């Protein structure tokens, strides 16, 4: 979008949009189809470890993975994701999620980005935050997501880059 705006003052203040697309390949399983995206994702607390998060993002970027992706937050029909963006996000304005299930059901939700660390509380909605170093993590909750064996998850990050 920036290339179409002539006044550089306006163009420099336009937010960037980063699309992350995951294909649902089995119950509680989704794999990225977007090239070059480094993620950790899963549908239960056991999918997330501090060591894996530290390897992807850098030590201590997410202070307590077991809190951010604990068994309460990762309840029924919840999908969590840590997105490695090489620390390039300065401000996370919003995240839009579109989940298309094989049944034809399509669910669209959105949330404002947060700078407050996620807690182990059941969100029952989309909840995303920016990490200390400029990466993104969060979760979405969609009815029947745990049982879905095909479809896709599309996350649209609306942010300002460093």
Image (cartoon, rainbow, N blue to C red):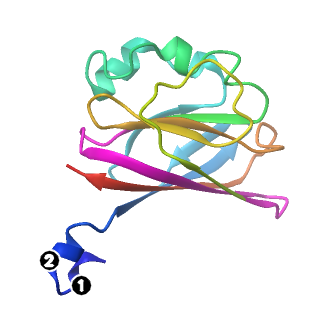
Contact between marks 2 and 1 (CB within 8 A): the answer is yes
Identify the disc placed on residue 36: none
Element assignment for label 1? loop
Q: Position of residue 74 (x, y in %)?
A: 68, 25
Q: Characterize the local packing of mark 2: few (<14), some (14-19) or many (20 or more) Cα atoms within 10 angstroms.
A: few
Q: Is residue 123 above or below residue 46?
A: below
Q: Is residue 104 left or right of residue 89?
A: right
For the question of whether residue 154 can be seen, the reply is: no
Q: Position of residue 96 (x, y in %)?
A: 56, 56
Residue numbers of the magenta segment: 82-107
Q: Which residue is mark 2?
A: 8
Q: Is residue 11 left or right of residue 155?
A: left
Q: Is residue 124 left or right of residue 118?
A: right
Q: Quadrant of residue 127?
A: top right
For the question of whether residue 97 can be seen, the reply is: yes
Residue projecting furthest to the left: 8
Q: Quadrant of residue 38?
A: top left
Marks 2 and 1, Cα distance to the nearest angstrom? 7 Å
Element assignment for label 2? helix
Q: Residue at x 38, y 21 (%)?
A: 62
Residue in front for this viewpoint, 15 or 70: 15
Q: Which residue is mark 1?
A: 5
Q: Is residue 94 a member of the stretch shown in magenta?
A: yes
For the N terminus, the quadrant is bottom left
Q: Is residue 133 above or below residue 140?
A: above
Q: Residue at x 60, y 36 (%)?
A: 139
């Amino acid at each position: 979008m920036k290339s179409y705006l002539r006044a550089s003052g306006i163009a420099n203040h336009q937010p960037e949009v980063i699309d992350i697309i995951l294909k649902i390949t089995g119950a509680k399983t989704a794999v990225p189809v977007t090239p070059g995206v480094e993620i950790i994702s899963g549908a239960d607390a056991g999918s997330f470890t501090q060591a894996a998060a530290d390897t992807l993002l850098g030590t201590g970027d997410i202070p307590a993975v077991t809190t951010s992706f604990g068994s309460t937050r990762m309840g029924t029909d919840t999908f969590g994701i840590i997105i490695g963006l090489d620390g390039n996000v300065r401000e996370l304005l919003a995240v839009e999620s579109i989940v298309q299930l094989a049944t034809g059901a399509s669910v669209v939700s959105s949330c404002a980005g947060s700078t407050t660390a996620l807690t182990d509380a059941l969100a029952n909605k989309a909840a995303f935050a920016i990490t200390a170093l400029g990466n993104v993590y969060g979760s979405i909750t969609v009815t029947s997501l745990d049982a879905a064996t095909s479809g896709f998850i599309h996350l649209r990050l609306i942010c300002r880059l460093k």
